[in-house]
Image (cartoon, helix red, strand yellow):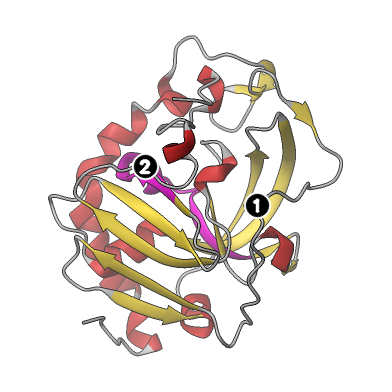
Amino acid sequence: MTEKLPPELLADPAVIAARLKRIERHRARMAQTPSLADDAPMGSGAPNRHGMPKLPPGQTPARKWPVLDVGVHPTVTAAQWRLRIDGACDKPLELDLQQLQQLPQVIDTSDFHCVTTWSKMDLTFVGVRVSTLLALAEVQETAAALMCHGYDGYTTNVTLDEALKDDVLVTWQVEGKPLPREHGGPVRMITPQLWAWKGAKWLSRIEILTADAPGFWEQRGYSMTAYPWRDDRYG
């Protein structure tokens, strides 16, 4: 059964802070992930926000933000949108867009690296940290990864050590405007320290797993880990 918390409780900083303490064990492992700790990263340009080269190897800056998907374009209105968080957690949740927007919001500027060799730099997103959502759901000790599901049937895996980073967002706004449908609106996930396919468009469910598992592209030969600065594109 999903937990139906009133918006004022969902947004209570004390509740969120208390529940975040339960996932602090991942902080040390996060600091050792390749996009933060690689001593020989691949790529070019001045250091980015995390000390890696600005552009991963093989990437070219894009003027526009290209549109890529698996060919299904669901129509989900802001009023219809729901996000379910379940699996290896003690308090499964279901949120609508209004509830998501009443949670602590983050404004974050990050880069968007697509495995098809383009990078859109310096996009400013507004949304909620995935760590906040997982804290509210009270992730269990056995949790290891997420399977992110889209309304289009798309799935992709993200380990907890990556998903809990501060720039991994469930986002509803980009560049000061509602997230466009073609880019996954009304709500998508972004993973700036991984290849962008790890951020599901039209996000509908975050399933918490006790063991990592492949999603749509991972089943078709793409990398389970997707580290841009190791040119980690395929399995």
Label 2 SS: loop
Q: Is residue 115 above or below residue 10?
A: above
> Which quarter of the image is occupied by the N terminus?
bottom left
Q: Which residues are magenta?
A: 156-172
**Three-letter amino acid code at the position of disc 1:** Asp
**View extreme (top): residue:** 40
How many marks can you see?
2
Circle number at residue 214: 2
User: Along the horizontal axis of the image, is 127 left or right of 14?
Assistant: right
Q: Which residue does the image show at 65% across and 18% down from the upper left?
A: 57
Gap in angstroms between the C-alphas marked 1 and 2: 17 Å
Circle number at residue 92: none
- Of 148 and 220, nearer the camera is 220
Name the image quarter holding residue 42: top right
Q: Earlier in the sequence, mark 1 or mark 2?
A: 1
User: At which x and y percent is residue 119?
Assistant: 72, 35
Q: Which residue does the image show at 61% across and 63% down from the upper left?
A: 126
**View extreme (right): residue:** 63
Q: Name the residue carrying label 1.
A: 69
Name the image quarter holding residue 21: bottom left
Label 1 SS: loop
User: Along the horizontal axis of the image, is 164 left or right of 24?
Assistant: right
User: Along the horizontal axis of the image, is 80 left or right of 6?
Assistant: right
**Magenta-span inclusion, residue 165:** yes
**Three-letter amino acid code at the position of disc 2:** Pro
Residue 210, visible in the rendered structure: yes
User: At which x and y percent is residue 140?
Assistant: 15, 57
User: At which x and y percent is residue 80?
Assistant: 55, 85
Q: Is residue 201 above or below residue 12?
A: above
- Of 46 and 119, nearer the camera is 119
